[in-house]
Amino acid sequence: MPRAHPLTAQLARLPRVHLAPLPTPLDDAPRLARALGGDRRGPRLLVKRDDLTGLALGGNKVRKLEYHLGEALAQNCDVLVTTGAIQSNHCRITAAAASKAGVDAVLILRPGESDAVQGNLLLDRLMGARIRIAPQPTGDAVGTTVAEEMESLRLKGRRPYFIPTGASTPLGAAAYVDAFFELLEQAEALGVAIDAIVFCTGSGGTQSGLVAGAALSHSEIRILGISDGTSRAELAPAVSALVRGLGARVEVTLDVAPEDVIVLDEYGGTYGAPTRECLEAIRLAARSEGLILDPIYTGKAMAGLADLVRQGRWRDDQTVVFWHTGGQPALFAYAEDVVPG
Ligand SMILES: *Cc1c(COP(=O)(O)O)cnc(C)c1O
């Protein structure tokens, strides 16, 4: 039983479909901690394994889809429509959730450098999603394609339910409030005090849930989002708005100012392009712990964590949680970068 947290009753009223085996593990990663700390040692490192959320190779989108699929089915929808990058983890999980619920999925994908049928795109096709590639990668072109698709489905008498990019909505945030309290409970059982949570932030849903959870519990845990390439100027207000939107949704005043949202945007480089430090971090995690990261999100977050540890951000007696958000299928679409030659 999850410990009662301040929003338990409100969130329990939202329709939800169980997709993820919870709680996900919280694992010690002592060899990676030592490798990151080097001579100066460094903090204890725990890894929150949200890559193990079960459905269709998992990741952070599974928790978010529990609430979105719940709402979609409550509205009697018969097709999920969403959008993302060509190697979108969110689109893969939407396709999987649709398969599991017996409804259709339409994915509007932004054209990328490679449309090789690999990684997430391969899994999307395997799960039978209908795929439309937007004519251009711009927000306008994608928006127009989504609007056309929704209209055409309605004209055919279908009942489409649209899930915004990354399922980063107040419902997506709700899922990560739950997740935050899940982590607190695990930390309590282990008898550890967590000083910071480090993870990759992209469309802000994960961060808004963690930040809201910390605010609700008056927790001192620092929520450090390392961006996937999105700028802090864009993300901090978006996270703040999602937190407010969650509050409105559950009729609780929730206010976190953009200045209080920590987004480190110096490690992400360009979205979708793995940096050298990201690739090094992927190899380090794989070789020290058998822990598999991905080239678009978690590798960049680990590169950021490595730099923060190197700078001496934490003492040896502190504990940092690296929140693994999944994404590993994309490794196979970036094979040449990950293991060159
Ligand atoms: C979507 C995604 C993120 C970013 O999460 P947001 O809630 O969109 O900020 C991080 N890591 C992985 C693997 C993802 O798929």
Image (spheres, grey):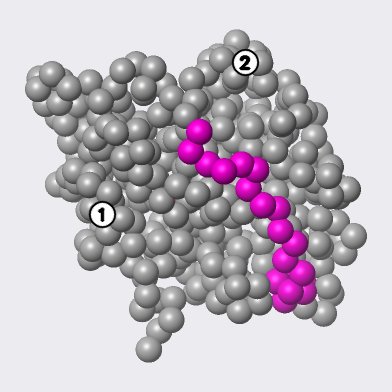
Question: Three-letter amino acid code at disc 1?
Answer: Leu
Q: Quadrant of the C terminus?
A: bottom left
Q: Earlier in the sequence, mark 1 or mark 2?
A: 2
Identify the residue at image location x=55%, y=53%: 52
Circle 1: is it few (<14), some (14-19), or many (20+) Cα within 10 Å?
A: few
Question: Three-letter amino acid code at disc 2?
Answer: Gln
Query: Is 76 positioned to the left or the right of 303 in the image?
Result: left
| Position in image of residue 43 (x %, y %) | 81, 62
Nearer the observer: mark 1 or 2; the answer is 1
Query: Is 62 positioned to the left or the right of 75 in the image?
Result: right
The residue closer to the viewer here, 290 or 295, is 290
Which residue bears the numbered disc 2? 10
96 lies above or below 161: below
Which residue bears the numbered disc 1? 126
**In what element is the residue under mark 1?**
helix
Q: Residue furthest top?
A: 251
340 lies above or below 285: below
Q: Which residues are magenta?
A: 18-37
